[in-house]
Amino acid sequence: MEWWQSLEDWFLALGEKYGVDPVIFGAIYVGGIPLFTLSLWWLIRNLRRKKPVVLPVLSTGFFFLSAYLYLIVMGRNIPWWVYALIVVLVTYGVFATWQKIKKGTAPKAGA
């Protein structure tokens, strides 16, 4: 398991090099998933009920971006390709979320 220790050391060294704690990033990323899901449910519910959606949209967006915001705010000397990867991931995530919203607000068959 020496290779595992080497991989772990390399991974944690990245945090020191770029000023981002990988454990905090991971905790924000994983911890944001249920909050994002709840916010998405809130948004779809408000859309169906024709209620205001500003707060659910802001909440959903914040929890979707929270780990990346941590990286952008706390990171130092982050390579350009990491920002490009974030743009690609966010673009795909917005598309996938939009598809979920459309599916969640579509009229039910027989309704």
Image: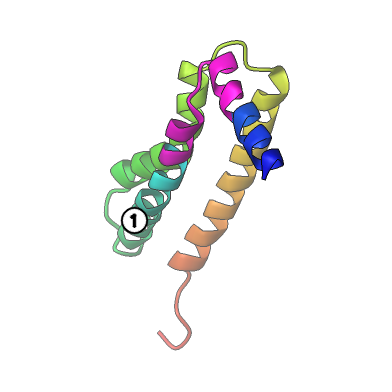
Residue 101, placed above or below residue 8: below
Q: Residue at x 63, y 40 (%)?
A: 89
Residue 108, placed above or below residue 49: below
> Residue 27, percent across and down?
42, 40
Q: Is residue 26 magenta?
A: yes
Residue 9 or residue 69, whichever sits in front: 9
> Residue 11, percent across and down?
61, 30
* Image quadrant occupied by the N terminus: top right
Residue 86 or residue 42, whichever sits in front: 86
Three-letter amino acid code at disc 1? Leu
Identify the residue under disc 1.
38
Tell how many labels.
1
Q: Residue at x 63, y 37 (%)?
A: 5
Question: Which contiguous range is marked in magenta?
Answer: 12-27
Residue 84, placed above or below residue 7: above
Q: Is residue 90 left or right of residue 104?
A: right
> Residue 102, percent across and down?
51, 61
Magenta stretch: dominant secondary structure = helix
Residue 103 or residue 5, whichever sits in front: 5
Colour scheme in the image?
rainbow
Q: Is residue 95 left or right of residue 50?
A: right
Q: Is residue 85 magenta?
A: no
Label 1 residue SS: helix
Q: Residues within 10 Å of mark 1 (few under 14, many from 20)?
A: some
> Residue 108, percent across and down?
45, 79
| The quadrant where residue 50 appears | bottom left
Q: Residue at x 40, y 41 (%)?
A: 63
Extreme front residue here?
2
